[in-house]
Image (spheres, rainbow, N blue to C red):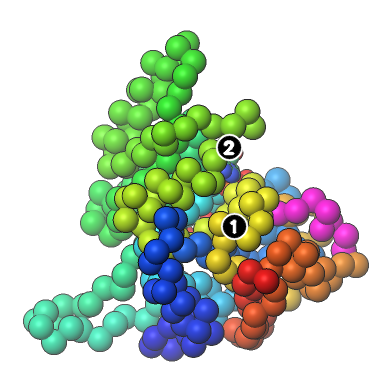
Amino acid sequence: MTSAPQFLTSLLDRYKDYNSQSRPSVTLTFAQSIDAKIAGKGGKQLILSGKESMIMTHWMRTMHDGILVGIGTALNDDPQLNTRHLPPRDPDPSSNGHSNPYHLPRPIILDTDLRLSPRCKLLKNFSEGRGRRPWVVCAELAAADSRAEWVDRRKELETAGARVVVLDSEAGANGLLPIPVILETLHKLEIRSVMVEGGAQVIRSFFSQGVTFVDTIIVTVAPTFVGEDGVSYNASLNILESGLFTPIAFLQSSGFKYHSREMFGPDTVVALCPA
Ligand SMILES: NC(=O)C1=CN([C@@H]2O[C@H](COP(=O)(O)OP(=O)(O)OC[C@H]3O[C@@H](n4cnc5c(N)ncnc54)[C@H](O)[C@@H]3O)[C@@H](O)[C@H]2O)C=CC1
Ligand SMILES: Nc1nc(O)c(N)c(N[C@@H]2O[C@H](COP(=O)(O)O)[C@@H](O)[C@H]2O)n1
């Protein structure tokens, strides 16, 4: 495959018509088992996607300005969020035979309390010229007793290469940053499309907003069972007999309708759009 699959272009090309929105276009995407688990016991990272659907996901990455994950995922998985599974591109004739890199999305981490490690792969890749500068999104910390520590952590992250984006809003009592403010802020920073890759809490947050802040859902369903100990993005899905169709029905009941599906190797990739 030397260009993005038609399955993706037919879904995401419509974002070009959304220029009048005051928020980026949002694709919520993740990989799950048949029993709707996105990670193993205790949050153990699982490679659920097979080779073909993983390549599809990396094509999807090239089609967005930003790629957003929660700090839970950043700490647990230490992701790279790049396009390394794609085939090398033909050299650009005007570049003296040098390779023609794919568009890399901007890594964006929702990190209320600035817990990201300055030694994470995202910052390492950036400092070695192999990745874009990560943005760490947080809220201004109000409590005076922990402020000095927060300022130190901010300095440490900035020294390591991160851009710390402080929202003009406080985190909720649950420690979560408000999705509307996050999206509005990213839009002001010229992010016109964002791929939200998880994890569980971030997926739940975006779902809880219904169709207001999500334009497309793309779920890779791998033909495997993880079991009840696994991490689910919705607790009510912890019913093994629910099989493949209950998660999709759940998504439909939250305001989305089935759009299309395609097999990538052994995995079924299902797309939903607002009803
Ligand atoms: N199969 C898949 O496609 C994926 C699986 N994962 C898995 O998900 C697990 C991590 O998930 P979680 O622990 O739930 O962490 P998470 O990645 O959802 O991050 C949650 C944290 O982000 C911060 N945050 C700030 N604002 C937020 C908001 N509005 N909404 C949600 N979070 C906000 C909070 O500190 C919160 O505790 C890992 O086991 C990882 O392997 C993660 C991504 C994709
Ligand atoms: N598409 C997909 N399939 C899986 O099986 C996964 N576990 C994930 N996880 C997401 O991808 C991140 C890892 O990215 P890198 O390989 O390091 O570039 C991980 O943190 C999750 O966000 N995705």
Residue stretch rendered in magenta on the structure: 233-240
Instruction: Give, as a three-letter code, the residue at label 2.
Output: Leu
Give me the residue at 62% from left, 76% from top. 271
The residue under label 2 is 176
Answer whether residue 47 is visible to the viewer in this image: no
Depth-wise, is mark 2 or mark 1 nearer the camera? 1
Q: Which mark is residue 100?
A: none
Residue situated in front as seen by the camera: 146 or 211: 211
Answer whether residue 196 is visible to the viewer in this image: yes
Which residue reaches farthest top? 145
Q: Where is the C terminus found, in terms of image quarters?
A: bottom right
Which tag, 2 or 1, sits closer to the chain's start?
2
Residue 127 pos. (x, y %): 25, 49
Residue situated in front as seen by the camera: 19 or 76: 19
Quarter of the view holding residue 102? bottom left
| Figure check: 92 above or below 194 | below
Other-residue count near label 2 (Cα within 10 Å), few / some / many at <14 / 14–19 / ≥20 = some
Other-residue count near label 1 (Cα within 10 Å), few / some / many at <14 / 14–19 / ≥20 = few
Label 2: element kind = loop
Give me the residue at 46% from left, 77% from top. 14
State the CA–CA distance, disc 2 to disc 1: 18 Å
Give me the residue at 36% from left, 39% from top. 165
Asked if residue 77 lies in the magenta stretch, the reply is: no
Q: Does label 2 point to a residue whose CB lies under 8 Å from ligand 1?
A: yes
Give me the residue at 50% from left, 34% from top. 112
The residue under label 1 is 212
Residue 225 pos. (x, y %): 78, 67
Asked if residue 238 lies in the magenta stretch, the reply is: yes
